[in-house]
Amino acid sequence: MADVVLSNVHKKFGTFTAVEDLNLDIQQGEFISLLGPSGCGKTTTLRMLAGLEFPTSGEIRIGDRVVNDVPPGDRDIAMVFQSYALYPHMSVGQNIAYPLKKRRVPKTERAGMVAKTAEMLQLTPLLHRKPKELSGGQQQRVALGRALVRDPKVFLLDEPLSNLDAKLRGYMRAELIELHQRLGRTMVYVTHDQLEAMTMSDRIAVMEGGKLQQFAPPQEVYRAPANRFVASFIGTPGMNIVDGSLHEDAGRWTFTAPGFSVDAGQLGPDARPGPAAMGIRPEGLTIGSGPIQGITQLVEQTGHENITVVRLEDGLRMTGRTAPDRLWRTGEPVQLSIDARQAHFFAEGPTGKRLNRDVCTMDAPGSNGTSLKEATS
Ligand SMILES: Nc1ncnc2c1ncn2[C@@H]1O[C@H](COP(=O)(O)OP(=O)(O)OP(=O)(O)O)[C@@H](O)[C@H]1O
Ligand SMILES: [Mg+2]
């Protein structure tokens, strides 16, 4: 059952369009992320769901109600803000109890609800402390507690982990996933961190320039990105994207870039001969053999693998993953191949549509470099 639905939602600030014709259908109990670069309209969207901002046009439903005109307090939602400012003079317990107090929940009931929430977030031993006596992660849990204590229908979270260091962020990510599984509540999570979105979400809504680019499960966003923008935004290191052109011969397509060409096989109905781009993730490159000549430019050792950047003859750079036991020296000549089955093809332009017919196969890198041939021209 759809729990939160945005239909044709537009938001303008003066003449500036922050959100353009947004359509989202969020299922009950689903964890979805709004993902995109700074300024793409994530917070604006979340604030419209919360009732802190009103759509210029379009409709927002929560449960079976149109909430366009419903004030925040009556929407049965709880929001955790990026700057979660706890009340410094209140104890942890008082901070968590505050939303209940504001809603005039009787004092006798409050204690039980706070105790239950504290237990769930492992804050029970800290209930009497003041925020300044807590670590960053503990403060974060109190902020979550304040949202959880009312047991709302929908949780709205705006970059709630961004103030934490990397290790704590990883820990809190796992905690949030577990919490979501336990509560089974609908959660809308705003982040510009693609790894957070990939690891936590049932589905990811990728936004750019106020427009929805794709709304799909993480694996689909990764393996069948709707367009060049989504392809380049998801994945670290990012997808290699090369400009070139497509040619067709009897239903089979070939992509040609300066210095090499790739057999694109059969493409979807939107493919046209002419300028286009090819995308290949680092795991779709084989470094060490193949028809393309290059020179290693940078080798980053992460421990379990090496990230190797190769400069091709014409200055193009390609990033690949290699096993840690094969360490290339910088400046060393190497050969390269592209697994054509893992290649994506995009129409011209920064948000050029993906032209492949299918989801890319994700076999081990280099298991098929044979469909690549050197440019004859
Ligand atoms: N009250 C406002 N008045 C005018 N412009 C606004 C207002 N609020 C947001 N904007 C603009 O709308 C656009 C979207 O802002 P929003 O806060 O939704 O971005 P965001 O995706 O959350 O970015 P970030 O990752 O930086 O938080 C931005 O260009 C922003 O400057
Ligand atoms: Mg924001």
Image (cartoon, rainbow, N blue to C red):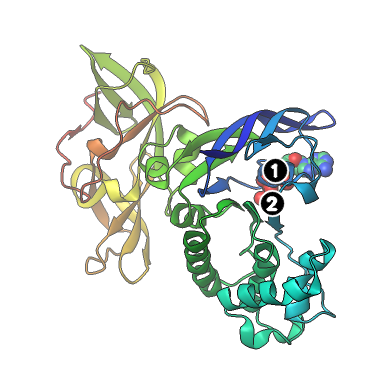
Amino acid type at mark 1: Leu
The reply to whether dot 1 and dot 2 touch (C-beta < 8 Å) is yes
First in sequence, mark 1 or 2: give its number: 1
Q: Determine the secondary structure under disc 2.
A: strand
Q: Is residue 105 above or below residue 64?
A: below
Q: Quadrant of residue 359?
A: top left
Horizontal placement of 20 versus 292: left or right? Answer: right
Residue farthest to the top, as pictured: 250
Residue holding disc 2: 77
- Residue 264's label in the rendered image is none
Query: Is residue 139 visible from the viewing direction of this image?
Result: no
- Per the image, the residue denoted by label 1 is 49
Q: Is residue 193 left or right of residue 15?
A: left
Q: Is residue 44 above or below residue 212?
A: below
Q: How many marks?
A: 2
The residue depicted at 30 percent of the width and 22 percent of the height is 267
In the picture provided, is 346 more to the left or to the right than 61? Answer: left
In x, y percent, where is residue 178?
A: 47, 65
Corner quadrant of residue 245: top left
Camera-near label (1 vs 2) is: 2
User: Which of the pair 97/137 is nearer the observer?
Assistant: 97
**Going 50% across and 48% down the picture, which residue do you hit?**
30
Would you place residue 304 above or below residue 78 in this image?
below
Q: Is residue 54 left or right of residue 369?
A: right
Amino acid type shown at disc 2: Ile
Residue 179 visible to an observer of this rendering: yes
Local secondary structure at mark 1: helix
Report the front residue among 209 and 97. Answer: 97
Tell me the distance, in whole angstroms, between the alpha carbons under discs 1 and 2: 9 Å
Which residue is more in the foreground, 159 or 233?
159
